[in-house]
Amino acid sequence: MPAPVQLPAVTARGPSVLAMGGLDAGDASVSSIVRVAGAHTAVIGQLPRALHDAAAATIAGASYFFGGGDAGATSDAILRIHPSGTTSAAGRLPVGASDVTAATIGPAAYIVGGYTGTVPLRSILSFTPGRGVRAVGEMPRPLRYPAVAAVGGVVLIAGGTSGVTARREVLRFDPRTGRVQRIAMLPSALTHAAGAALGGRFYVLGGRGAGLDTQRSAILAIDPSSGRITHAGHLPAALSDMSAASLADRIVTLGGRDASGQVHDEVWTLRGAR
């Protein structure tokens, strides 16, 4: 990455990945829009304001940025990110929210949980370009910072926190029914992990426990149907607050924070995880 970053909003667009916003090494929000294509990274634009802990998703080839926060204030904006790096307004969330995550199924992105600045959220929202936002599901409890990905036509949600306590639940949201159910329990409580889909499985990468210095390197693979969890490998370093995106045959991870508090700028490509 051009600079160290934690928790940028990321989404795959074609053969590349977009990383937007996040926190820098000094815990300040950033506004850069970065394109990652193989080993090459480039700043291609700027968000209208510096934001962290936002979400991103690509729908029908177009990329969108949801929410985010900065200096105690949260954003309700939904932005379309154009190939040139410019942005335009595409809608609004029901409330301003940071700590959100998102995943795409078909013509819609699903925005999971978040934090208004005063209370955590348990909502699952659907955003369809041109049709706006609607509430489509509700989790058993509010969640911030879960690992999330869409696989097999459902959204899987792992770990997270509703305050300071990390969670172990793996939830499955089926947009066809609106039902949310618990399908598994992680080996240990986990929050601030990254999530991505590859080869029909949900991968949970890194993260930490409740403590700020309890980063993990484990990669877990979760079957979306059975909930079976297997260990699929390790990251090169123990990191939380990294972001991940799925390309056709690989997962790309960006940035993150280690147990010493150092913020990283590495881009890793993960292939062939079992």
Image (cartoon, rainbow, N blue to C red):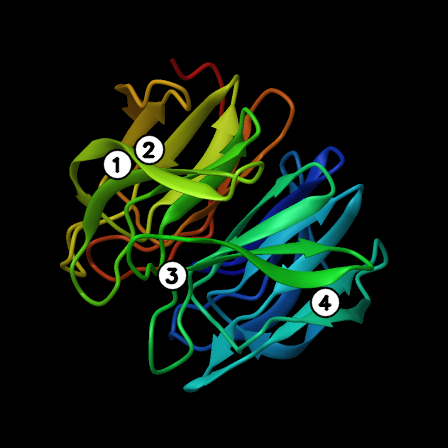
Q: Is residue 132 above or below residue 258?
A: below
- Residue 93: x and y in percent read 61, 71
Mark 2 residue type: Pro
- The answer to which image quadrant residue 55 occupies is bottom right
Q: Quadrant of the C terminus?
A: top left
- Which one is earlier in the sequence, the residue at label 2 or at label 1? 1
Mark 4 residue type: Leu
Element type at mark 3 = loop
- Which one is earlier in the sequence, the residue at label 2 or at label 3? 3
Q: Which residue is mark 2?
A: 236
Mark 3 residue type: Arg
Q: Is residue 154 above or below residue 46?
A: above
Q: Which mark is residue 79?
A: 4
Verify CB contact (< 8 Å) between mark 2 and mark 1: yes
Q: Which residue is mark 1?
A: 217
Verify CB contact (< 8 Å) between mark 4 and mark 1: no
Q: Which mark is residue 122?
A: 3
Element type at mark 4 = strand
Query: Of residues 246 and 147, which is closer to you in this image?
Result: 147
- Residue 166: x and y in percent read 19, 54
